[in-house]
Amino acid sequence: MRILNALLPLAAVVSLSAQDITPKIAVFVPDRLIANTVRGRQLFAELEVVKKNLEEKLKAKGEEGARLQAQLQSPSLSDAGKEQITKQLRDADYEFKKLQEDSQAEFQKTQQKVFGQFQQEVGPIVDAVAKEQKIQLVLQYQQGLIAYGEESWMLAFTNEVAKRFDAKSPAAPAAAKPAPAAKPAAKPATPKK
């Protein structure tokens, strides 16, 4: 009799329906949220501006080095002139490398700030939608990590988060144009038949 009483709780666990033990899962696609929301584009526009400015500075410094290199190849240049341009070229090369390091550090700092702000604003919305929809697991989509997924199902959760993200964010400037509907960062692969 003791064995039977010990097995009764196990029988109750085994009799659970598949619905009771099947987790409800959603997929969150941050790239889609960034591309398809006014607030997402606003946040990441700062990062693009910083990137463009840094690239322009690096390009100008690189052109300066190329100009000095061309001068150094001039056959009419005296030995003293070659020595002076060689020194200028060495200095320009050092400045270019320093500018690269500084630019990378500045870009990474801005990137961390923007991603931190994005996470701070989106995180609570993702949590709220997941709780409302009784989702136990939200996977963040990254290109190449999902071999197959039905696209409309994968984007349903992100689309709901996007609506709330834009609704919660401050009004966008009148000049901001909505982006055309975009697909996720990479279209999930379809299974081979």
Image: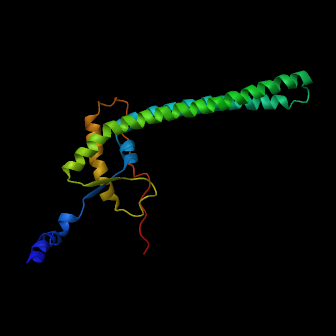
Residue placed at 26% from the left, 45% from the top? 127
Residue placed at 55% from the left, 29% from the top? 53
Q: In the image, is residue 163 above or below residue 103? A: below
Residue 13 seen in the current view? yes
Residue 128 lies in what quarter of the image?
top left
Image quadrant containing the C terminus: bottom left
Image coords of residue 107 (percent x, y): 52, 33
Q: Residue furthest front?
A: 2
Q: Is residue 117 shown left or right of residue 52?
A: left
Task: Out of 164 and 121, give the one closest to the viewer.
Answer: 121
Residue placed at 30% from the left, 58% from the top? 153
Image coords of residue 45 (percent x, y): 44, 34
Image quadrant containing the N terminus: bottom left
Q: In the image, is residue 11 above or below residue 53? A: below
Q: In the image, is residue 136 above or below residue 179? A: below
Q: How is the image coloured?
A: rainbow
Q: Residue furthest left?
A: 1
Image coords of residue 189 (percent x, y): 43, 63
Task: Out of 76 and 131, give the one closest to the viewer.
Answer: 131
Q: Is residue 70 shown left or right of residue 4?
A: right
Image coords of residue 73 (percent x, y): 85, 32
Residue 38 seen in the current view? no
Residue 122 lies in what quarter of the image?
top left
Task: Out of 34 and 15, give the one closest to the viewer.
Answer: 15
Number of numbered callouts drawn: 0
